[in-house]
Amino acid sequence: NRPLLLSQLTTYGNCKPHDLGIIGDDSIEMLSDKLKNVLWNDGIDVIISTGGISMGEKDNMEQVFVEGMGGKIHFGRMNMKPGKPTTFITIDKEGSNGTIC
């Protein structure tokens, strides 16, 4: 998924994709720290993740974004192929204090 997404995003006007690589799901704190850095320190406006939001034991993205960063789920577990389950979450960077669970 990563090579295709990076290739597609590069074709859009002023979109400058940053490949964060694979972030392990062994530790929710490690995942939280990486995402906190990206959103609050690196000036990134959009995060596209291709994993970690499903229903598995180690799918922690929803918890990190919603509980830890005050994110709002607009829709989740949308039954769409390819790419299911799809979830859309927004975080108000102005209204959030940047605290991660």
Image: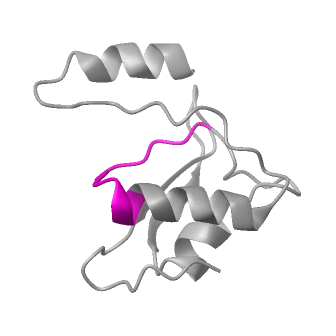
Residue 14 on the magenta segment: no
Tell me if residue 24 comes above or below residue 9 in the rendering.
Answer: below
Quarter of the image holding residue 23? top right
Q: Is residue 45 left or right of residue 100?
A: left
Q: Is residue 57 left or right of residue 45?
A: right
Q: How many marks?
A: 0
- Residue 3 percent location from the top left of the image: 50, 14
Q: Quadrant of the C terminus?
A: bottom right
Tell me if residue 53 comes above or below residue 32 in the rendering.
Answer: above
Tell me if residue 4 comes above or below residue 29 in the rendering.
Answer: above
Tell me if residue 65 comes above or below residue 61 in the rendering.
Answer: below
- Residue 82 percent location from the top left of the image: 57, 25
User: Can residue 61 be seen in this snapshot?
Assistant: no
- Residue 64 percent location from the top left of the image: 62, 69
Q: Is residue 93 left or right of residue 31?
A: left
Identify which residue is drawn at 60% across, 64% down.
33
Identify which residue is drawn at 21% across, 15% down.
11
Residue closest to the eye, 9 or 39: 39
- Residue 13 percent location from the top left of the image: 10, 25
Residue closest to the eye, 35 or 41: 41
Identify which residue is drawn at 54% across, 68% down.
65
Quarter of the image holding residue 34? bottom right
User: Furthest-right residue in view?
Assistant: 57
In the image, the segment drawn in magenta is: 39-50
Residue 47 on the magenta segment: yes
Q: Quadrant of the N terminus?
A: top right
